[in-house]
Image: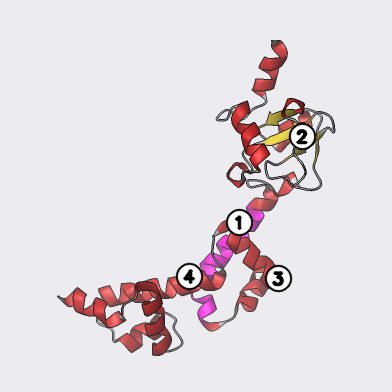
């Protein structure tokens, strides 16, 4: 009985053993970083998304943090790399990189330069930058920049009397044609339809 109680104490306070075990067996990404599993037979601890074949449930214990797993005598898995789990210093570092990138994009960085220039400004490679944005933002830097331009243009249409040409260039579009194409793709409507509706 005492061993069961001790085992329960290793679990994250908002999760139970059954939930953790199901998430581990399913390699559920939603639980990545929320807990770590230690395998008694190998003395290795893993993330829920570890690609290695899952150990039998009776051989596994669960921990709220990597530190707790290591304190219990487990060593980190070299396949799933617990040090890169969400919430870890490495993961927080990549989130910071994306946050810096988002600030630059919102300032119009990609309106005048390329994604390669953005990657260089952030100190990472273009492919790695794309992976980071897909992981943390769910979209590429160019997609985020395109959305920002359309949103800024829509705001200017609603709140100013600027001409459409002025709005197009103020929002970061390279031409009025790109401005019109972007609105057609996003809203399935011409920019002028919003101005008429606004005035009405």
Q: CA distance from mark 2 to mark 4?
A: 46 Å
The residue to which callout 3 is attached is: 125
Q: Could you say which is closer to the camera, residue 88 or residue 39?
A: 39
Give the distance between the C-alpha atoms of the residues marked 3 and 1, in whole angstroms. 15 Å
Residue 83 placed where, x, y %? 73, 46
- Per the image, the residue denoted by label 4 is 106
Of callouts 3 and 1, the N-terminal one:
1
Q: Residues within 10 Å of mark 4 (few under 14, many from 20)?
A: some
The foreground one among 175 and 184 is 184
Q: Residue at x 56, y 68 (%)?
A: 140
**Splitting the image into 4 quarters, where does residue 42 fall?**
top right
Residue 185 position in % (x across, y down): 40, 76
Q: Are marks 3 and 2 in contact (CB under 8 Å)?
A: no
Q: Earlier in the sequence, mark 3 or mark 4?
A: 4
Q: Residues within 10 Å of mark 3 (few under 14, many from 20)?
A: some
> Disc 3 vs disc 4: which is toward the camera?
3
For residue 108: magenta?
yes
Please tell me whether mark 2 sits on a helix, a strand or a loop: loop
Query: Does residue 91 appear left or right of residue 169 in this picture?
Result: right
- Front-lying residue, 190 or 123: 190
Q: Which mark is residue 55?
A: 2
């Amino acid at each position: 009985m005492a061993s069961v109680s001790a085992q329960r104490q290793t679990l994250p306070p908002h999760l139970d053993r059954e939930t953790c075990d199901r998430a581990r067996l399913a390699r559920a990404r939603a639980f990545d970083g929320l807990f770590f599993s230690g395998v008694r037979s190998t003395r290795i601890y893993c993330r829920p998304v570890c690609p290695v074949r899952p150990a039998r449930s009776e051989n596994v214990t669960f921990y709220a943090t990597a530190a707790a797993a290591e304190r219990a005598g487990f060593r980190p898995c070299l396949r799933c790399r617990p040090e890169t789990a969400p919430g870890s210093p490495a993961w927080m570092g990549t989130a910071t990189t994306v946050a810096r990138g988002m600030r630059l994009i919102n300032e119009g960085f990609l309106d005048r330069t390329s994604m390669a220039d953005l990657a260089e400004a952030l100190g990472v490679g273009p492919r790695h930058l794309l992976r980071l944005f897909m992981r943390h933002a769910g979209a590429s830097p160019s997609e985020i920049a395109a959305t920002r331009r359309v949103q800024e243009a829509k705001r200017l249409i609603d709140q100013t009397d600027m001409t459409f040409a002025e709005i197009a260039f103020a929002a970061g579009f390279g031409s009025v044609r790109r401005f019109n194409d972007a609105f057609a793709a996003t809203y399935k409507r011409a920019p002028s339809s919003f101005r008429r509706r606004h005035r009405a």
